[in-house]
Image (spheres, rainbow, N blue to C red):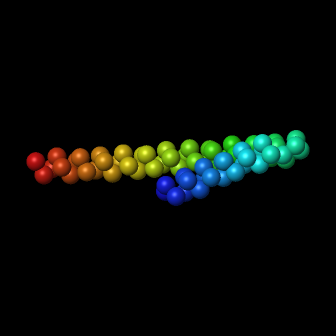
Amino acid sequence: MVATIDFYLARVAQCDQEAQETNLANVKERCLRSKAAWQIMSDRALVVQIDRERKALDKMRNEDEHLD
């Protein structure tokens, strides 16, 4: 999942760079829309990753409680 988030963030950076480098308004708008979409995907993937890690931690805690 980290590789996916890293991929998304790389696309965010790429879109940002392309938006800064262009002088064409329509291209800049397209790049900024793409940047926003990639950022949303990255944010969602991060939320999923955090939730999975939290569930795994809770599971380990419950297993530890049963061993005591």
The residue closer to the viewer here, 26 or 65, is 26
Residue 66: image x %, image y %? 15, 50
Question: Number of labelled discs?
Answer: 0
Residue 40: image x %, image y %? 62, 44
Residue drawn at point x = 45 percent, y = 50 percent: 49
Specify whether residue 31 is in view: no
Q: Is residue 23 left or right of residue 31?
A: right
The residue closer to the viewer here, 50 or 32, is 32
Residue drawn at point x = 50 percent, y = 47 percent: 46
Quarter of the image for residue 35 reads top right
Residue drawn at point x = 40 percent, y = 50 percent: 52
Q: Which residue lies furthest to the left in this view?
A: 68
Residue 57: image x %, image y %? 31, 48
The residue closer to the viewer here, 27 or 59, is 27
Residue 45: image x %, image y %? 53, 49
Q: Is residue 57 left or right of residue 67?
A: right
Specify whether residue 25 is in view: yes
Q: Residue furthest front?
A: 21
